[in-house]
Image (tube, grey):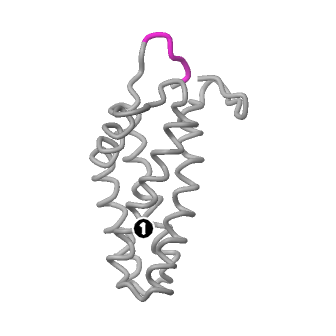
Amino acid sequence: MESMLLKCPAWLPTRFVMFGLVGLSGVVVQVLVLGGLHRIAGVNFLWAQVLSVWVAMTTNFVLNNRLTFGDRSLVGASFFRGLLSFYAACTLGAIFNVLAAEGVYAMGQHWAVAGAVGAVVGSISNYLSTSRLIWRKTSGNQNE
């Protein structure tokens, strides 16, 4: 995939970098939603973390569909099937995310640090599963 916005060396897959940048935006979304729910609305940390992961997963799907996998972008009914598949593919990463965040928070770390650690822990699993299951490679696609 060639991106007009991003040029990567041949050894570094452009899609991986784009997925990572979208994932970084997801960390920001997750921590902001977590803060809003936990600190402002008074939601218990665990439930706030679960909800913030879901919001971040949704925004990441939308951004990845448009930016990272724009040449394979899902539209119409395929978009919604893809979103449901994305949730399924990210379930293991989401579990790792919530468990890591809960563990870090239980150790006395600040809620934002715990949320960010959880988001980072889940991201590798999510890239591996979604790049292979949701936006499948077709012949002719390069720099995966």
Whether the magenta-drawn stretch holds residue 25 is answered as no
Q: Is residue 93 above or below residue 73?
A: below
Q: Secondary structure at mark 1?
A: helix
Crowding near the residue tagged with mark 1, few <14, some 14–19, many ≥20 C-alpha atoms within 10 Å: many
Q: Nearer the viewer, residue 71 or 11?
A: 71
Asked which quadrant contains residue 143, the reply is top right
- Label the magenta part by its dominant secondary structure: loop
Residue at image point 55% right, 35% down: 68
Q: Is residue 140 above or below residue 82?
A: above
Residue closest to the far top? 140
Relative side of 126 to 12, left or right: left
Q: Is residue 47 above or below residue 24?
A: below
Residue at image point 43% right, 53% down: 58
Relative side of 133 to 140, left or right: left
Where in the figure is residue 13, as x and y percent of width and height? 56, 30
Where in the figure is residue 108, as x and y percent of width and height? 43, 87
Where in the figure is residue 20, as x and y percent of width and height? 55, 46
Asked which quadrant contains residue 53, the reply is bottom left
Region of the chain picked out in magenta, as a range:
139-143
Where in the figure is residue 65, as x and y percent of width and height? 49, 37
Residue closest to the far front? 76
> Which quadrant would the N terminus be assigned to in this image?
top right
Residue at image point 45% right, 79% down: 37
Asked which quadrant contains residue 12, the reply is top right
Q: Nearer the viewer, residue 42 or 92?
A: 42
At label 1, the amino acid type is Ser
Picture mark count: 1
Residue at image point 38% right, 76% down: 48
Q: Which residue is mark 1?
A: 52
Q: Nearer the viewer, residue 78 or 127?
A: 78
